[in-house]
Structure formats: structure tokens, C-alpha cells
Image (cartoon, coloured by chain):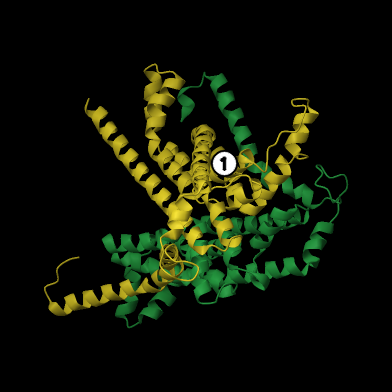
Amino acid sequence: MLEAYPDNRLARVLLWSFCALVLAFLMLPTLVVVPLSFSASDLLEFPPRAYSLRWYENFFGSATWMAGLRTSLILGTLTATLAVPLALLACISINRLGGRTALAIQGALLTPSIVPGILLAIGLFFVLAAQRLVGTLFGVLVGHVVLAIPVACIVLLPALARFDWNQVQAARSLGANWARAIGGIIVPQLQISLLSATLMAFLTSLDESVISIFVASGQNSTLPKLMFLSLRDQIDPTIAAISTLWTVIVLVAVLIVSFRQKS
Amino acid sequence: MTVLADPALAADARRERRFFLSLSLPALFIVGLAAILPILWIIRQSFLTTGGEYTVGNYEKVLSSGLTWSALVTTVELSFGTLAFCILLGTPLALALASARPRVANLLMAFVMLPLWTSILVRTYGWLVLLRREGLINAALTGSGLTAEPLPLVYNFTGTLIGMVHYMLPLFLLPVYAAMRDIDANLVRASASMGATLGQTIRTVILPLSTGGIFSGSLIVFIYTIGFFITPAVLGGGKVNPLSIRIERTLSTFQDWGSASVLGILLLVLMALIGVMFLAARRLMARNKFGTAHA
């Protein structure tokens, strides 16, 4: 855009060095944990003087951390399994109805992502407390599903907009019922978007911390909740090992999504 | 909808519409159950004593407490502080990205997206490691002789702000970058060929055309930061107490559900106020643009 100013070297150098600093600021905290996780020392020394895998052993050997990991993976899977079909149906509805009704539905589905997490968390805590469901997997699950639905919708709505609805009409006129039309025509054609939506829903749940902090407890504590509690008390390099693993998992998922979408 | 002459066909169309409407019911039900009902419950709880009787005592207690008002001030300070730094750091970055060749821009965007995809807890931990007294940044500062003593960079307002700016910057950048990328390069060329300096072009052509993006970005910053919890809880070290932290403390330490709910409602009111301010500002700016176009 600024190629109209080829002579302004100084401005260009200044702008780009500023950008390099900002990008470094953005990358630094993610990258700094990686070498730390391989440190052999109890202290958070940087760069580590000796390397080891002891913090990874610590993580995989701890019953508490493993329970957290298990809970998070189960929750993520359940969240994706529930949120994506619900989002798909809602998106079909939005896509077909159009106009004000569609806007209203879309607005309602987006509410959870606008309301501050802390409010959802304490509100859900109150509701669950009244039903004696605090600390159950179910409580956290509802919270995560409701956060994952808008994320899945963001992926699925544009995909549905590109979908040729005449195919469904044709299937219907040839005698297919709705379940068959949706399952046999829409789902296979939206395969890639559905995969993206599933991964995004999974990641939303995996990454969610505030609702988990308030609503999950004991055996059902998620990994983010355990990380939060341990960050408040002490900062030992086990967290660095978890953080590194966590980032790798998320990056792999994101890369799968972006490559799938391009191909 | 087209008007169908045949009543049978019209009935068919109505039935189909009802069917499509019903498809969104399961999702709407979950949202009602896990988002709308909790908010209503907070409102209800704010009028109840611990014994479950109706009262306005919670409001009197919370609104007369100095802690509430200082929490409100801290919340607003953190939000505006984060916004200021996002504008300061994000706008030039967006400009550089928008003016870069697409391949370079895409590569650099990956750097922006990486933190966006990193768990907030991982990032918070990273900042703890970097900003501690014995941390990397203080080691560099004292090692190079820039400062004699390590600076207090974390477990205070500064640390919280750094963490929040870091969290919000990619989210702020995305709409600003999108707006700048959509600017017609011919406008910039025209401005340059008519003798405007780079600074003039940025001020009078590029920035006005990206206000929409900057507005959306700022709104996103507010929506997120107003209820921010993890970052002040960890990087604030107990010294930074915005509304979110007060809510948590009132709930878990004092078991005072009523007061926690009142604080929650304050948070909602604050959000609504800022939302209204934004809409008003946007309308005002749209009117001004219209005015200058006719002048």
C-alpha cells in the first residue's frame, strides 16, 4: 500500500523495526517456556545449564495432572460431539429462514461469547448449586458447549452459504426424509468445514479456564484449572512442560484445520 | 417470501418454515440454559439474603463499600490502558502488514496468530517467567547496567497490563488489518502524487479509512477486558483488584453470593454503558463524515 513512497527509507526502517519489536513481544512468552521445560534444574534459570526430561516425567507421573488431562480431553471430545451437530442444525435454520428471524437466532447464539466469562461462570455456579450439580462433569460440559456453539457457527455459516440448496430440494422431491437429506447430502459436502468446526469446538473447550475454575472440582478439575491453581501457589517447571505440550497439541490442530481448508 | 396463490402451497411453505425454525431450537435451548438462565439467576440472587429472603441489603452493602468503587476504577483503568497500548502498538503493525507483500504478510500473520492460539495460562506463565524479580527481563536490565535494581514488573498493575495487552493485541489487530488491507491502493497513490507527505497520507487518507476497523477492534478489547479474570488473578499478585477479582473473592472467600451477584450486575451495567458510548461515538463519527462530504 505504501509503495507510493519508495524514497522514504527512514520511515520504512522505523516502521519495520517497530513491528519486529511488537512481534517479538507477541512471541516471547510462548517461546520462553519451551527451553525451560527441558531444564534439569529446580530453578527457573534461563538458559538452562543442563537439560533433562524430568519435568515431563513429573507431569506424566502425577496422578493429579493425569486426571486433569483426562478430564480435559473427555470434556473437549464431548463438547465437540454435542456442539457441532447443534450448531449445524442452527446454521441450516439461520441459512434457510433469512431476514430478521435469522438475525435474532444468530444474536441469541452469540450472547455467550459477549457476556464476560466470569459472569457466565458464577451464574452457572448458582444454577448448578441449586440443582446440586456443582463439581460434576455435566456442569462444565454445558458451559463449554454453549461457548463452542458460536465458534462452530462462525465456521459453518459461510460454508452453508456456499452450499447449493437445490440438491436438498432434489433429494426431498425424490422421497428422502429430512434426516436423510441432511445426513446424506449436507454433511458429506460440508465435511471439511465440519472437521474444522469440530477441532475449533474441541480447542474452545480445551482452552476454557474461567468456567472450569468455578464449576469443576475434585476429580473433574480440568487441566487449565489445575494450571491456574498451581500458578497462584508456585511456579515450578512442570507447568513449562505442560505448556509446551499444550502449545504443540494446539498448533497441530490449527495446522490441520488451515491445511484442510486450503486443500 | 413470495405470496403463494394456492392455499395448499402456502400451507406447505409455512410448514417448512416452522420446520427450519425448529432446527435451531436445541442450540437455543442450551444457550438459554447455560447463558441466559445464569444471568437471570445472578439478578435474582442479588436480591436474596443468605437465608433466601428478599432484600436490597446486598446493594446497600456493595454500593457503600469503598472496595467496590476502587474495583470499578481498576477495571476501567485496565480496560482503557489495554486499549491505549493496543492502538499504539497494533495500528502501526497493521499498517506495516497491510503494506507488505501478501506472502510476507501471511507469514507475519502466523506470528500474530501463534499467541492467539496459545492457552492464556501458558502465556501468563511465560510472562511470570519473563517478568519476575529474577526473571529474564530483569536479568537483562541489571546485567547490561541499565538499572541497578531489578524493576517490580509483575505482581502489580504493570504486570497485569502487560499480560492483558499481550492477550488483546492479536484480537485488536485482526479487524484493523482487515480494514487497512481493503483500502484502495490508488487512493494512497493519488494522495502521494498530489504531493502529500507520508505522514499526511497516513493521517488524512489511511487512518480515516480504517476507523471502522479500529472501532471494532476497540469494542472487542472492551468486551474482553471488562471481565478479565485470569491475568489479574495471576499477574496481579493480589494487589490488582478489578471487579472480576472482587466477584471471585466475595464468592469463594466470603461465601457471600448476594454481594457477588451485585458486583456481577455492576459489571453488566458497566458493559452496557460502554456499549452505548460506543454506539453514540460511532453515530457521531458517521454523521461527521457525512457532513464533511457535503462541505
| Left or right of A169 on screen, residue A261 | right
**What residue is drawn where x is 59% and y is 29%?**
A18
Three-letter amino acid code of the residue under disc 1: Val
Instruction: Check the image and name the residue furthest to the right.
Output: A50
Which quadrant is home to the N terminus of chain B? bottom left
Which quadrant is home to the C terminus of chain B? top left
Q: Position of residue B57 (x, y in %)?
A: 44, 59
Q: Position of residue A26 (x, y in %)?
A: 62, 41
Closer to the camera, A230 or A172?
A: A230
**What residue is drawn where x is 57% and y is 72%?**
A134
Rendered image quadrant of residue B291: top left
Closer to the camera, B65 or B189?
A: B65
The answer to whether one can see residue A36 in this image is: yes
Rendered image quadrant of residue B253: bottom right
Secondary structure state at the residue bearing disc 1: helix
Would you name the residue on which mark 1 appears? B165
The answer to whether one can see residue A193 in this image is: no
Above or below for A188 versus B283:
below
| Left or right of A232 on screen, residue A52 | right
Q: Position of residue A120 (x, y in %)?
A: 49, 62
Instruction: Check the image and name the residue furthest to the left.
Output: B5
Q: Position of residue B266 (x, y in %)?
A: 44, 52
Tally the numbered discs. 1
- Which colour denotes chain A? green
**What residue is drawn where x is 78% and y is 47%?**
A35
Chain at numbered mark 1: B
For disc 1, the neighbor class at 10 Å (few under 14, some 14 to 19, many from 20) is many
- Which colour denotes chain B? yellow
Above or below for B78 versus A84:
above
